Image (tube, rainbow, N blue to C red):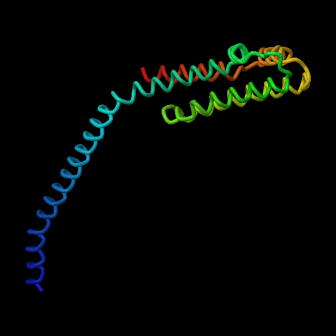
Amino acid sequence: MENDINSIWEILKITLPALIVFLTAYFLFRDMLENAQRQREFEFRVKNLGKMTPVRLQAYERLALLLERIAPQSLLMRVSPHELNASDYHQQLLSHIRQEFEHNLSQQIYVSAILWETIRGARENLIGIINKSAEEIGNDAPALSLSKKIIENYIEEENQAIAIAMNELKKEIGKLF
């Protein structure tokens, strides 16, 4: 029995220090490998940041231009009524908004999800104002009447969605710099 205890004691004297050395080496190597991985990721991000920043800024510029182009004051100046009735003018306005938005759909990958949803909400809000204005004046009214009604309804809005979206865009750009 005493020989068994001595044998176990001798085995423990050898394995316990070996186990401590192994665990120490394991944790040191693991930390060293994790730090090396983080360093490579950091270098990759820094390298790509130089390439991504101009692209992201261009996306912000395009989205600012989108918001400016679909703002009622700008949209109504660009899409002139040319002797159209309200119904035809209504369709032209919605078509221009749709085209502008579809032209800039790809920019959503460069901005935050919150900003993109704010821009989409601004577009939907404007479409709602245009639809409401068209309903209020009727299909056979002159296009100029629809134009005036859209401006009136847009001005009556307490929180103008396009202005809110533009402010959100500016805030997000401000976070980059």
Spot occupied by residue 148 in the image (x, y as percentages of width and height): 82, 13
- Image-quadrant location for residue 56: top left
Query: In the image, is 100 to the left or to the right of 28?
Result: right
* Image mark count: 0
- Image-quadrant location for residue 75: top right
- Image-quadrant location for residue 119: top right
Query: In the image, is 150 to the left or to the right of 78?
Result: right
Spot occupied by residue 66 in the image (x, y as percentages of width and height): 60, 23
Foreground: 40 or 85? 85
Foreground: 122 or 90? 90
Name the quadrant of the N terminus.
bottom left
Above or below for 27 versus 167:
below
Which residue appears at 54% of the width and 34% of the height? 108
Foreground: 115 or 77? 77
Which residue appears at 15% of the width and 60% of the height? 22
Query: In the image, is 170 to the left or to the right of 41?
Result: right
Task: Pick out the residue farthest to the front.
Answer: 83
Name the quadrant of the C terminus.
top left
Which residue appears at 14% of the width and 66% of the height? 16
Spot occupied by residue 82 in the image (x, y as percentages of width and height): 79, 15
Spot occupied by residue 152 in the image (x, y as percentages of width and height): 82, 14
Query: In the image, is 153 to the left or to the right of 124?
Result: right
